[in-house]
Amino acid sequence: MTKSLAVSSPRAKRSGGWLAQSWRLAPRRMLWALCAPLLAGVLFLFQAWWLADILDRAVIGHAALQQLWPAISIVAGLLLVRALLVWSGERAASSGAEHIKHWLRATLMQRLLNKGPTWSRQHPSGELTTALIDHVEALEGYLQRYMSAAVAAVFLPLLLAVVAMGVDIVVGLLLLLTAPLIPVFMALVGWGAEAANQKYHQALQRLSGIFGDRVKGVFTLVLFGRAKEEVEAVQQASQDLGKTTMKVLRIAFLSSAVLELFAALGVAGVAVYIGLSYLGMLGDNFTGMTLQQGLFCLFLAPEVYQPLRQLAASYHDRAQAKSAITSLEAIFKTLPAVPNKNVELTSNEAPEAKWEGVSVRLPMTDSNGVTPALQVEGFSLTAPGTETVLLKPVSFTVNKGESIALQGSSGSGKTTLLESVVGLRARHSGEVRLYTEGAGSNDGELGFLPGVCLLSAHPFLSGETVEQVLKLAAPEASEAQMWNALAKVDMEHVLRTQHAGLQTLLGTRGYGLSGGQLQRIALARLFLCEADLVLMDEPTAHLDARTRDVVLDAILAFCADKALIIATHDPAVAARLQRQWSLQDQTLSGVQS
């Protein structure tokens, strides 16, 4: 346990430091959210004094109501101004919190995309989803409530107690002595709250990961008779989360009870002292307080503890936010850097993706009339997460209109090579230049790679219907264009005669479609996109010879003016392409630099 705390302490400190600086992402709104409660507290001094004066004049001076209307109007005006200040501060805090959460989600999402599929496959999908949604959402309480409550709790009790001391020194001392006890006990309780929240986020992350992975592999679990055991594992993780949640709630209620106890004792002490002084039971030295002064002190006493009460109510928000940020750092290794300058970011601004080592340029034609689509220099690869060399440094150029077969034994690195070329995997060295029509003026700083199409060996069909899957490649595609794309992969007649056409269900409810048919539906997206460079990994692996030839004819016709690289084990496919590369023994042979 000691070792665990020692290891997590530096990370917890970094999380606290990041949270303390997070207001810089929306400085104007967050600063007003911090200052508005302070201004409202200062105005309360004047409101309390005028209200005490009204009661003193009415009770002791027997003033008529007409004489009191000006003072009553002042008190009502101060009350209205204070309400507007508090409302505007809460609105600014809410707006700033939403802005900061939006920025953090966009930054983490972009970092996830930049890390590529190799990194994301090492983490359960449920864990990453929880990180981007629940962990970021856990910052709302800290940004919207805790920060303003913490600033108010530091300054307002001290200010009110000093003012009360100017009226009566005993009242001021009572407030100054009792108020600091609340933060002390809150800190003691807060240590347990932070540890409990950390366990809560770990349990939530574990449940999300387990549930997401089990749902994804439900058919495999049923096939191997493991469904019952895995259901029990999910139930156990759910029970653990419930127990951890109740621990967090128990600590939260305990901290509130401690605060209410000391606040009640402080207010009661002031009330008893003032009452005894009016009755003359404290001696002649304690009978000089007027009704206005006594009422003013009584009005101040609850307000001294009110900021501390609000701090206690939102103290668990800090523990929750700190635990969430610690969990984010554990997943992503580092936290996004908060800008050093207090620069207001626009609400729609998101960080740009920068594909390291990949530059995107406009097409160019050399003196021989050849237009390159891909140029690679000094390109080398290592196995993901290891130092094992997959490819020694190599340079090559692929021109538009060329078709290349990438061959090699399983595990030689063909898939890694294709994904590394477009920046989805890290490479050991080398520079990659892509020449596409969509490069525009944002050379090398695009959030995506325009004009590039990569079809993996196991494409992911997200969406419920065939139409939704196809529109991922071309959202504006017409029904005729989608049927034309399906015809090119020999799926038009299958969907029209045996299924529900473009509304055929896929995914977990897509019964009746074979693996080869699903592969062809994914492949049909190629014919809806505009690409200058097409990279394909075993596109005909699940097809019979006749269907393979039909699909390959369509691919070659579509890519006649494009650069095409197909990784394949099929000699019949390789024979149809213009050039053959072989990746063996860490060497890529057959290339032309």
Image (cartoon, rainbow, N blue to C red):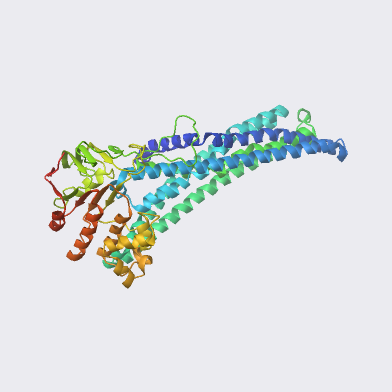
Please indicate whether residue 564 sits to the left or right of residue 154 in the image: left
Q: Which residue is nearer to you in this view: 284 or 232?
A: 232
* Front residue of 460 and 321: 460
Residue lying at the far bottom of the rendered structure: 497
Quadrant occupied by the C terminus: top left
Q: Could you say which quadrant of the image residue 472 lies in? A: bottom left
Q: How many labels does the image show?
A: 0
Q: In which quarter of the image is the N terminus?
A: top left
Residue sitting at x 39%, y 43%: 108
Q: In this view, does 96 lie above or below 508?
A: above
Where residue 522 appears, x then y in whole percent? 30, 58
Give left or right: position of 180 versus 518: right
Residue 466 x/y as whole percent:
35, 62
Residue 205's spot in the image, x, y percent? 39, 51
Residues 564 and 137: in front is 564
Q: In this view, does 9 lie to the left or right of 427?
A: right
Please tell me which residue is depicted at 61% across the width and 41% down the height of the picture. 262
Residue 273 seen from this side: no
Q: Is residue 391 visible?
A: yes
Q: Position of residue 567 (x, y in %)?
A: 19, 52
Nearest to the observer: residue 230 or residue 482: 482
Q: Say if 61 sits above or below 199 in the image.
A: above
Within the image, what quadrant is residue 327 found in?
top left
